[in-house]
Image (cartoon, coloured by chain):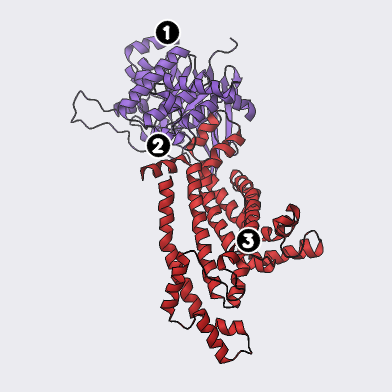
């Protein structure tokens, strides 16, 4: 294999020209995904998760969008490809599932048509073949009576069924990488669990890599192998899932963890809230981007932007004070690293 | 489905009743005596009175109305006072030219407007978009008779490519038929095209921002497929509404253009009937126009169901 990672994003900067000037929604994001692993991308709304995801498939309006950096898929920089070449990759090598299954399927075509379209777009096969494969895909994604469902329109299916149909569509050409942008956010909790389980099963069958974008840390803990935490267009922490949950180093990650309600412990205690709101992209703080909301911020934080640095082989963080939050064991590991 | 159509047809009855009353009243309340007009300036009072009683015009209005209504319900719209042919026959004879012009105008409008509207939506904010919007504003504002006169000046008088005015039926050969229709159809279709192009643009702009368009792109579809298959089908409903509404207008309201181009259509029939105080023709024609208009709307509504499956479902439930 000529490439190191299935997908490697290097210093990606995605900016939009708007009426109020140029806005950089993703500012120097780097991470990678290997085959068979699920990487979670976590953060509040507006932190650049979805823009990162849509940058990978280049789904943003390119007249108004400017990309810098590299997105290497199997060693090829996707940002350098022509639109025709990108169309060969979309839905074939890399697929995407979107947040809202209610609006992500075209209301005027049957789900069978929409799934079969993905197959015939990329593979030479007859309409009957595409159709029978569609039925098979629907069966594999757990849709009951797929022979009938295949003829139904999106509005005739429930939310969970629609998301299953979306997954079937995404998997139609056996992609190597699946980008799931908040795939369970719009669904009931019980359906969420089923969909996540389905994605896990399908991943094990096919060894594809998954990028799971979510703001739900519970989902991350359940299915991800590695986690990238984003804040205001930057990666502020990256670690494998155990390390991150045991020892979150960035105050923002810590805040996110504390903001998850738990059933045990003192329930009278108020739920932790990260103070303030994600600032607008027009008013990016000068130093550390999280400084205005951080309880540990000092003068260095508000003046100099920290860099993402490796604290241990398993963990990177973008914080001046990360060392303070480390436990003994990690300190030891870090000495080894130095 | 058939139940729905039946319901819609029944709901036409009150509309037609109102139109019948209004038409009947307006015609009789306007000054001018048909008997006097028919007999000319030289007729004496006695002759006029005789003709009035012969036509039933001396009866009270209410009685006249019920006589007329009773006949209408039996499918008899009366006879023209002037030419003595049944009103229905006169209507059918004049419907052909009008429908020919309307269909050609509509085809021209659709063929021009939809691609242009889509182009403007895809290049929103560019010079092309502004040009399309500007020209279409012009198209909506310029009266069709003025445009018709300019077209005649340019293509008929100056270039001599097409006849100035008149009408040849389809039986005289397709090209001969079309030759006479092109200019009036352009004059009528330009405004149609402007309306449809604007609606296509705004409807496409809405749809292009929808999530399923992103899904279609993420599938790896070519941009032309995304736009012309996935987006256009969804944008069709509002476009279809505009087409339906304005097509009704083309069939029923082309009077001015028909006059400019001297086409023996419904518009001319109405105008000449008004000049002659030919009550029976005015009443019958307006009533039949109303029926046509309502039927066209019904057809458009049925087309919605073909374009959008969600409309079909609602109907099943109703």
Q: Quick check: A132 above or below B252?
A: above
Asked whether residue A219 is in view, the answer is: yes
Q: Residue at x 48, y 50 (%)?
A: B301
Q: Residue furthest right?
A: B159
> Quadrant where the N terminus of chain B lies?
top left
**Front position among marks 2 and 1:** 2
Residue B220 picture location, percent across and down: 57, 28
Which of the two labelled residues, at mark 2 and mark 1, occupies the earlier sequence position?
A: 2
Neighbour class for label 1 at 10 Å: few (<14), some, many (≥20)? few
Left of B37 or right of it: where is A30? left
Which residue, given by chain and number where applicable, does mark 1 sit on?
A336
Badge 2 sits on which subunit? A
- In this view, the mark in front (2 or 3): 3
| Letter of the chain that mark 3 sits on in the rendering | B
| Cα gap from disc 3 to disc 1, whole angstroms | 91 Å
The answer to whether A36 is drawn above or below residue B55 in the figure is above
Residue at numbered disc 2: A278
User: Does any portion of residue B31 appear in the rendered image?
Assistant: no
Quarter-of-image position of residue B170:
bottom right
Q: Residue furthest top?
A: A336
Chain drawn purple in the picture: A
Q: Which residue is mark 3?
A: B98
Q: Which numbered mark, 3 or 1, is in the foreground of this view? A: 3
């Amino acid at each position: 294999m000529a490439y190191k990672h299935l997908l490697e994003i290097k210093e990606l900067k995605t900016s939009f020209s708007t009426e109020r000037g140029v806005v950089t929604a993703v500012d120097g994001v780097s991470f990678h995904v290997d085959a068979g692993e699920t990487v979670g991308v976590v953060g509040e709304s507006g932190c650049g998760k979805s823009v990162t995801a849509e940058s990978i498939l280049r789904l943003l309006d390119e007249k108004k969008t400017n990309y810098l950096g590299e997105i290497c898929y199997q060693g090829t920089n996707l940002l350098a490809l022509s639109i025709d070449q990108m169309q060969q990759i979309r839905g074939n090598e890399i697929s995407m599932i979107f947040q809202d299954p209610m609006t992500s399927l075209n209301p005027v075509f049957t789900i069978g048509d929409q799934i079969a379209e993905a197959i015939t777009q990329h593979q030479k096969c007859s309409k009957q073949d595409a159709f029978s494969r569609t039925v098979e895909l629907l069966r594999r994604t757990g849709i009951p009576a797929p022979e009938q469902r295949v003829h139904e329109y999106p509005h005739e299916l429930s939310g969970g069924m629609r998301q299953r149909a979306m997954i079937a569509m995404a998997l139609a050409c056996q992609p190597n990488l699946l980008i799931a942008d908040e795939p369970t956010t719009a669904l009931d909790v019980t359906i969420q669990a089923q969909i996540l389980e389905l994605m896990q099963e399908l991943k094990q069958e096919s060894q594809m890599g998954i990028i799971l974008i979510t703001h739900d840390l519970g989902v991350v803990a359940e299915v991800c192998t590695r986690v990238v935490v984003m804040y205001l267009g930057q990666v502020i922490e990256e670690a494998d899932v155990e390390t991150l949950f045991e020892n979150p180093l960035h105050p923002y990650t810590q805040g996110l963890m504390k903001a998850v309600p738990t059933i045990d412990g003192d329930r009278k205690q108020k739920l932790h809230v990260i103070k303030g709101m994600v600032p607008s992209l027009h008013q990016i703080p000068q130093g550390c981007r999280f400084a205005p909301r951080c309880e540990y911020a000092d003068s260095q934080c508000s003046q100099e932007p920290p860099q993402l640095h490796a604290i241990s082989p398993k963990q990177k963080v973008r914080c001046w004070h990360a060392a303070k939050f480390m436990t003994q064991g990690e300190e030891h590991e870090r000495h080894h690293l130095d | 489905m058939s139940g729905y159509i039946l319901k819609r047809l029944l709901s036409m009855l009150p509309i037609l009743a109102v139109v019948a009353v209004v038409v009947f009243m307006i015609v009789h309340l306007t000054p001018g005596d048909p008997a006097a007009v028919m007999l000319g300036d030289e007729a004496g009072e006695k002759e006029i009175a005789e003709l009035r009683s012969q036509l039933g015009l001396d009866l009270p209005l209410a009685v006249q109305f019920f006589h007329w209504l009773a006949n209408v319900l039996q499918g008899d719209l009366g006879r023209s006072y002037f030419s003595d042919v049944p009103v229905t026959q006169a209507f059918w004879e004049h419907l052909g030219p009008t429908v020919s012009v309307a269909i050609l105008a509509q085809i021209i409008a659709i063929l021009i407007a939809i691609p242009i509207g889509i182009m403007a939506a895809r290049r929103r904010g560019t010079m092309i978009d502004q040009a399309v919007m500007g020209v279409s504003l012009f198209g909506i504002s310029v009266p069709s008779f003025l445009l018709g006169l300019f077209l005649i000046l340019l293509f008929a008088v100056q270039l001599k490519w097409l006849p100035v005015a008149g009408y040849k039926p389809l039986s005289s050969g397709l090209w001969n038929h079309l030759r006479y229709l092109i200019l009036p159809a352009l004059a009528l279709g330009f405004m149609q095209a402007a309306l449809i192009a604007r609606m296509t643009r705004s409807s496409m702009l809405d749809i292009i921002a929808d999530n399923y368009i992103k899904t279609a792109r993420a599938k790896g579809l070519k941009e032309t497929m995304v736009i012309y298959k996935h987006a256009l089908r969804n944008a069709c409903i509002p476009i279809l509404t505009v087409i339906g509404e304005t097509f009704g207008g083309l069939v029923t309201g082309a009077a001015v253009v028909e006059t400019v181009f001297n086409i023996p259509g419904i518009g001319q029939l109405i105008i000449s009937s008004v000049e002659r105080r030919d009550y029976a023709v005015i009443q019958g024609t307006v009533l039949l126009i109303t029926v046509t208009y309502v039927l066209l709307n019904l057809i458009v509504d049925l087309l919605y169901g073909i374009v959008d499956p969600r409309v079909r479902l609602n109907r099943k439930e109703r």
